Amino acid sequence: MIFHPLILALFSASLLSGFMVLYASAFGARILRRWDLRSGSELQLGLERRTYLVSTLLAYAFAAQLLSLALFVFTADRIAGFFVGAMCAAGTLKANAFGYPTLLIKGANGILAGLWLILNAADNKGYDYPLVKTKYTWLLAAAPLILAEVVLQAAYFLRLKPDVITSCCSTLFSQGGSSLGSDLASLPMAPMRVLFFAFVLLSAALGIVFLKAGRGGVLLGVSSAVTLVISILAIISFISVYIYELPSHHCPFCILQAGYHFIGVPIYFSLFGGAIAGMGVGILSPFRKVPSLSEAVPRLQRKLAWAAVACFLVLAAIVIAAMAASNLVLPG
């Protein structure tokens, strides 16, 4: 194992988050079994008092979960110098078999955490805890993934060895190779450009439609999720190539480095921000008719729709600017 302050910080945050999720899950299971707002029993009153405290603690844990994803990638990039062959996070994550699985599950958990925070924000606006069972059902479904992340991250960091020779990003994301990264790098650039801009602008347009008419929230949520996937593929396929001005360099991590003006930071933040906000509009749509949320949910959805539109337009603008400033000329 490599001892580094960032690794220790991730360990501590992961263990604390895992403990909070376990505690909240046990309480959530009790909520699902015993919650009855019509009852004035001592048990029900106790549950009502505790649910606010548990939800608040869990909100901090899930906020930390979102930060943990960014910190994990940053840490992987910062410790690349410990490994022969690694030039960025791509090589560090390849140093053992647990790196990329940890990144994938952290990404999934970050999205789930963001959506839970949106559900919790809506529930807090109702006087009768209208979404308490929904958000704890969501928690119980997400808990195994959170705990799996704790285990995978621990296995990854504990098995890191400085004497390991790993692969550089040029090898991992090279066209014509046999790895998944190579397959993604080999995606045709022209169709991926069309797909990327089509879905980013479609999601922004659906957000504007929702703001104008108050309809189409579920469609915006679905479109935002698809845009997230397509955009990640597009970053590997063609966006990174324009930034590096090298047709053979498809790494999705080097764009986070100072040599490229940290352009990857606003790209990823606007992408994930827009996707989570857009999906949040969708998951709140079924609760618009809940009496205690009939005014609060539409207001929250509008804020999220504004955020989604802004993030997707910023994403498109950054990519267009990067392409326009690039000296690379590609066919098609």
Image (spheres, rainbow, N blue to C red):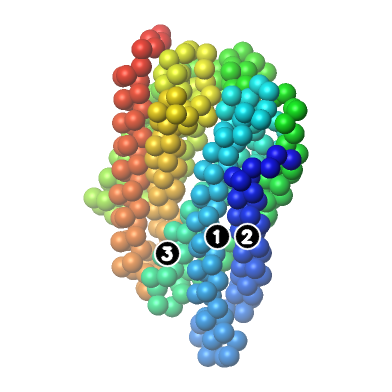
- SS of the residue at dot 2? helix
Residue on which disc 3 sits: 121
Classify 54 as above or below 257.
below
Q: Earlier in the sequence, mark 2 or mark 3?
A: 2
Classify 278 as above or below 23.
above
Q: Are marks 1 and 2 in contact (CB under 8 Å)?
A: yes
Residue type (three-letter) at the residue carrying disc 3: Ala
* Label drawn at residue 61: 1
Give how far across and how far down residue 324 sits, in percent. 31, 19
Residue type (three-letter) at the residue carrying disc 2: Leu
Between the residue at mark 2 and the residue at mark 3, the CA separation in whole angstroms equals 22 Å
Q: Is residue 273 visible?
A: yes
Give how far across and how far down residue 41 sits, in percent. 57, 91
Between the residue at mark 3 and the residue at mark 1, the CA separation in whole angstroms equals 14 Å
The residue carrying pointer 1 sits among few (fewer than 14), some (14 to 19) or many (20 or more) residues within 10 Å by Cα, namely many
Q: Residue at x 54, y 86 (%)?
A: 45
Q: Residue at x 68, y 23 (%)?
A: 84
Give how far across and how far down residue 190 sits, in percent. 42, 17
Give how far across and how far down residue 315 sits, in percent. 36, 35
| Quadrant location, the C terminus | top left
Q: Nearer the viewer, residue 158 or 215?
A: 158
Q: Residue at x 64, y 42 (%)?
A: 4
Residue type (three-letter) at the residue carrying disc 1: Ala
* Label drawn at residue 16: 2
Q: Is residue 224 visible?
A: no
Q: Nearer the viewer, residue 34 or 331?
A: 331
